[in-house]
Image (cartoon, rainbow, N blue to C red):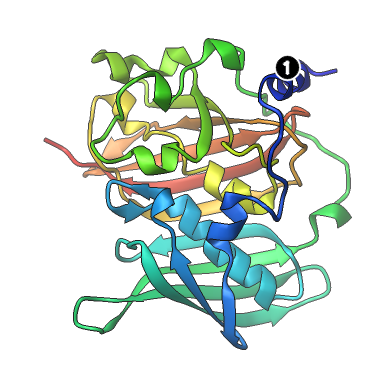
Amino acid sequence: MPEAAIAAAERASIDPVTASIGDSEFDRDTALTRRAPGVYDIDLSAGWTIISAVNGGYLLAVLGRALADALPHDDPFTISAHYLTASQPGPATVRTDVVRSGRTLSTGQASLFQCDENGAEVERIRVLASYGDLDALPDDVRTTAKPPVIPPIEQCFGPEDGPAPVDGSSAIADRLMLKLDPSTLGWALGQPSGRGEMRAWFGLKDGRDPDPLSLLLAVDALPPTAFEIGLRGWVPTVELTVHVRCRPAPGPLRVSIVTRNLAGGFLEEDAEVWDSADRLVAQSRQLARARLG
């Protein structure tokens, strides 16, 4: 049995599963109501906020769920999002459009809208995605990628072990099982390493196992790598692309994020997500704005 699977089993013995896929807080808070073909309503939960803005991974999961309903295929293979304005908790509308429907892949686009203080509709996020059937993919894997080396969960640290890294940022942390690799926690002690790396065990606090939609959350749920570079404060996402490679096995995920270049006030974050069976289940790259000075 892979070491990661053993760790997952040990974790399960400590925190038994209390929620299942389709019946968890994440599922309830990403559920939409179909108003008309291709048009959906949702009340964005304040439980997934960072400071006052809604987390980008949660938003991506909301739009991903809408596209899964609108398209003939259920599973996101690749989804690219441009974050146009910060989303706020409260009512929102998602509009989808089927771009192409094929035998193995279908492509669609979706936008999320909210009304501003004057009642004018504002587009918050726009995505383009291709969907398919992850279970129909061949098993052949040829890769040089290796799972991140992270200490066992009980040797890592979560938000509950210290103050929130940004004032008012604890809402989403209350819904996650997030245990950070101590070697990427220098920023929390006032001694950032400068390496721009973040690694953690990841899961949902209520014990729900991962699925393709929750992978869209996982790639954007860790503290920003900017903290380990020596920056503080909000790091808003400009663009985020996620590739879902296979359906994750039950148990906690391992997430590794690296930034190699900060220039002109922007940085990239390259993420890998590994499941309890030591498989690379998702990859992402995002461009984010760094608050300098």
Q: Position of residue 63 (x, y in %)?
A: 54, 66
Q: Nearer the viewer, residue 287 or 133?
A: 133
252 w.r.t. 100: above or below: above
Q: Quadrant of residue 258?
A: top left
Please name the residue that numbered disc 1 is placed on: 10
Residue 149 is at least partly visible in this image:
yes
Q: Is residue 175 above or below residue 237?
A: above
Residue 220 location (% of width, % of height): 47, 44
Please name the residue shown 59% across and 17% down the image.
Answer: 153
Residue that sits furthest to the left in the current view: 293
- Which residue corresponds to the image point at 55% horizontal and 75% vertical from the top-left? 109
Judge left or right: residue 29 versus residue 230: right
Image check: 243 left or right of 21? left
Residue closer to the observer: 84 or 34: 34
The furthest residue to the bottom: 36
Position of residue 112 in the picture relative to residue 208 (left or right): left
Q: Residues within 10 Å of mark 1 (few under 14, many from 20)?
A: some
The three-letter code of the residue at mark 1 reads Glu
Numbered circles on residues, count = 1
In the image, residue 9 sits, relative to residue 165, either above or below, namely above
Q: Would you place residue 32 above or below residue 231 in this image?
A: below
Quadrant where the C terminus is found in the figure? top left
Looking at the rendered structure, the secondary structure element under dot 1 is: helix
Q: Position of residue 255 (x, y in %)?
A: 56, 31
Whether residue 172 sits left or right of residue 234 in the image: it is right
User: Can you tell which quarter of the image residue 121 is in?
Assistant: bottom left
Depth check, front residue: 209 or 83? 209
Tell me what residue is drawn at x 37 percent, y 26 percent: 196
